[in-house]
Amino acid sequence: MDIKRARIVVVEDEKIMSTFILGSLRRLGILDLYAFEDGASALREIVKVKPDLILTDIHMQPVGGIELVRQLRSLSDNRISNIPVIFLSADSSASTVGEALPLGVSGYLVKPPNLTALAAKIEKALGR
């Protein structure tokens, strides 16, 4: 899939970081974007939006990224439960990365993401 045609959900609770990530995606030519402030609101909408990719922060309230992915992976609809996910987090501790990667995610980037690294992770996640 051409990344410019991808439908991407961004889950980020910090407004400044959300604006930065959405701006970075637009610079990559990705325009079909949806933004949510926490995992609970994102999960409700993901089943409707059916994105090609989810970019999510890890530490959010009331539902963080790790719990979002756990809930997503437990859904019975394979089109939803198998959506590729890339974690974006300022937390690069071994314990957090160790908890996140076994969830079957397509990548983990430390915020703020470098545009080139972000594009490469997205392309890999989308099977390019």
Image (cartoon, rainbow, N blue to C red):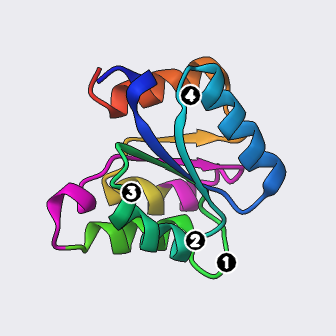
Residue 33: percent from left, percent from top: 54, 43
Whichever of labels 2 and 3 marks the residue nearer the N terminus, that label is 3
Q: Is residue 95 magenta?
A: yes
Quarter of the image for residue 111 reads top right
Q: Of the residues under marks 1 and 4, which one precedes in the sequence? A: 1
Q: Is residue 73 left or right of residue 106?
A: left
Q: In front here: 27 or 14?
A: 27
Front in this rendered view, residue 28 or 116: 28
**Residue 42 magenta-drawn?**
no
| Residue hosting label 2 | 64
Residue 69: x, y in percent? 40, 65
In the image, is residue 9 above or below residue 100? above
Secondary structure of residue under mark 3: helix
Give coordinates of residue 99: x percent, y percent: 46, 63
Which secondary structure, mark 2? loop
Q: Amino acid at mark 3?
A: Val
* Distance from the alpha carbon under mark 4 to that under mark 3: 22 Å
Label 2 to label 3: alpha-carbon separation = 19 Å
Does the CB distance between marks 1 and 2 fall below 8 Å?
A: yes
Left or right of 88 on screen, residue 53: left
- Residue type at mark 2? Gly
Of residue 83 and residue 90, the one placed in the foreground of this image is 83
The residues colored magenta run 76-97
Classify 10 Å Cα crowding around label 4: few (below 14), some (14-19), many (20 and above).
many
Question: What residue would you read off at disc 1?
Answer: 61
